[in-house]
Image (cartoon, grey):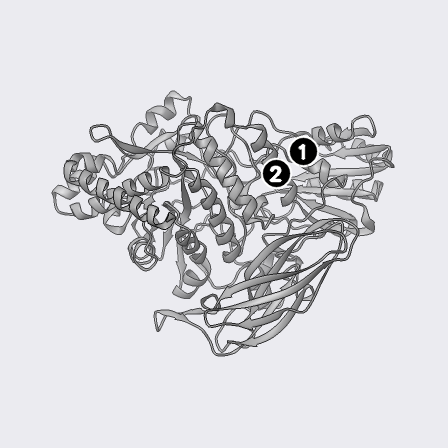
Amino acid sequence: MQRAREEKGRDDVAARVAKALVELTLEEKVEMLAGHGFFRAYIDDGMRYNARVYLVGGGNERLGLPALLFTDGPRGIAVGASTCFPAAIARGASFDPDLEDRIGEAMARELRAHGGNLYGAPCLNLLRHPAWGRAQETYGEDPHHLGEMAAALIRGAQRRGVIATAKHFAANSIENSRFRVDVRIAERPLREVYLPHFRRCVEEGVGAVMSAYNQVNGEYCGHNRLLLRDILKGEWSFEGFVISDFIYGVHGADAVAAGLDVEAPEAIHFGPKLLAAVKAGDVSEGDVDDALRRILCTLLRVTSNDASATYGPEVVASTTHVALAREAAERSAVLLANEGDVLPFDATRIRSLAVIGRLAAEASLGDHGSSRVRPPYAVTPLEGIRAYVGERVAIRFADGGDPDAAVAAARESDAVLLVVGYDHTDEGEFFSAEMVVENPDHRSGEGTMGGDRDALTLSSGDEDLVLAVAAANPRCCVTVIAGSAVMMDRWSGRVPAILYTGYAGMEGGTALARLVFGAVVPGGKLPFSIPSRADHLPFFDKNADTIEYGLYHGYTKLDHDGEEAAYAFGYGLSYTSFAYGIPVVEVGNDDLSVTVGLTNTGTRDADEVVQLYIGFERSRIDRPRKLLRAFRRVTLGEGETRDVLFRVKRDDLAYYDPVRAGWVIEDIEYTAYVGGSSRAQDLHGTAFRL
């Protein structure tokens, strides 16, 4: 019955749109393929981006057709004083699609309260190298993990009547030269590494895909027919619309012919130029009709979901959404080290705690580019600690500017919490107001903030501070705030406890206090690899004009090269311990099932992220040694045992053969590896054949 209603709804939408296409003039159609009023609004708002929702396409008052009303959203709705969730890279560490689904719902409610219906999330570009300045906006380095987390956000958002936007399509993972860089990539890595997560989002029914600024194999992504028409709309049967990245994502009216449907946020190359191109016969009216059909069908279909609900200002940063932000921060923290069980701190035994570091007294929420969220408040680590312990524990704060004072505070206290890392000046979107208003054709590499990192370590001052403080008091926990991997080799061996939180959102300070004092057990896992040496990473040049992307990065490159990570993809400790059984594999006609027993062998109820990798060691071609193919976050009580079941499609074992122009499943012996991280010592394997 539900399916019949959905099909009838689709038929009704298609009929309404078909009728509109007959009644609209060519001029009206072209007008609906671009945004209007953005530059004037931006200036009127004092050049504050996302001060309001923007009309970026659609809309015809004469026929009563709705418009696309957009704002950004990877870590929360960027308009108004909305809930600021942890950055996506932190939420990626939760390995929790159910949580991400609920966050998608919350973001959609808030956007509807602000009057919008389209938002710029999820960002699911692959984290190829930790120097990428916008790594914080994506979920991690693995295509399968990326796809599942992004699909969950899409489900939640579109269930509540908001169109999600999968971005940036494709191979976008350098920030400073994003407007010009040409990513050269062979067909196998393109298909196997850089596109699968986008395909997963299409399978989930995402309404919009945003093209990237960069070029792929000599063609700008907004004009790349192979990506947009042949693969996305052809092979994958994508029914939604393609929207350009803002201002610099279109280079001519011919983008419509290549498969771009909307120029955002303003008609620079569409509008009158597109109208002239159609009249001259350079662009077909059929392509214009197809673009508009996609826009209107998606708008009417998605916004009909949850249409009877009304969301007012009271849902924005509501108590429920703020609690969800805190839960996300708690579930996203990754415990990297805990020698001697320094954590959790015991508030009944510790009489004094030194809280050290500039970032302890700041709410470092992430970059100040398009993803910036301005919540009504944000809890700093220092505020969170003070609120949690009250009068029970004396807090000594030192910002680290005076190292001697910091060392003295550490020496005089029973324990130390040291907060170090990055903020929006160190990494993030490479953007300046001049790029938008004064010179829309700007392609310079000079910006006012963020951008790609120059170093993968903490600043030398932070590293010196860590070493000095840890030497003064060995009961020390270092909390790291950053948007991707931070190399810690200079100091990690001197510090007993390390907690990675990422940009933890408006309730990050509250969550941190609950984590370090044991009210919450850390259960997050690294969504990226932290290498032991920088030269174990792929080549990266933030100012590159041309760069080559290959088959290997992250844990696949480390495996391929025989190198050990300092901290592996999928790694994370707990305040309890878990024991795994040997996986049992059953092969079916279309899929295989893998079952493993998991036991909580410790003394705390806690979560474990169970990970399934498929091994290809016996492949006859050059393939990764193993690839993540499923994961599940499981909650177990003290002493509890549970069987965890995974199902994997046979097609997920295939590789892409450029000669056959298709996917091939090898007739070889595979291995199902199950465990708590991608490290060999954490995995239990069972061989099988299909």
Using the numbered discs, state the Cα–Cα distance from disc 1 to disc 2 in whole angstroms. 8 Å
How would you rate the neighbour count of disc 2 (Cα within 10 Å): few for under 14, some for 14-19, many for 20 or more? many
User: Taking the image as drawn, is residue 472 in sight?
Assistant: yes
In the displayed structure, would residue 67 be above or below residue 333?
above
Across and down, in percent, residue 161 comes to 40, 37
The residue that label 2 is drawn on is 504
Report the residue at 73% width, 33% height from top: 400
Across and down, in percent, residue 1 comes to 37, 49
The amino acid on which the numbered mark 2 sits, given as a three-letter code, is Ala
Please give left or right for residue 238 compared with residue 526 in the image. left
Asked whether the residues under the numbered discs 1 and 2 touch, taking CB atoms below 8 Å apart as contact, a structural biologist would say yes
Q: State the mark number for residue 232.
A: none
Report the residue at 72% width, 37% height from top: 514
Q: Nearer the viewer, residue 31 or 486?
A: 31
Q: Nearer the viewer, residue 546 or 430?
A: 430
The residue that label 1 is drawn on is 509
User: Taking the image as drawn, is residue 133 in sight?
Assistant: no
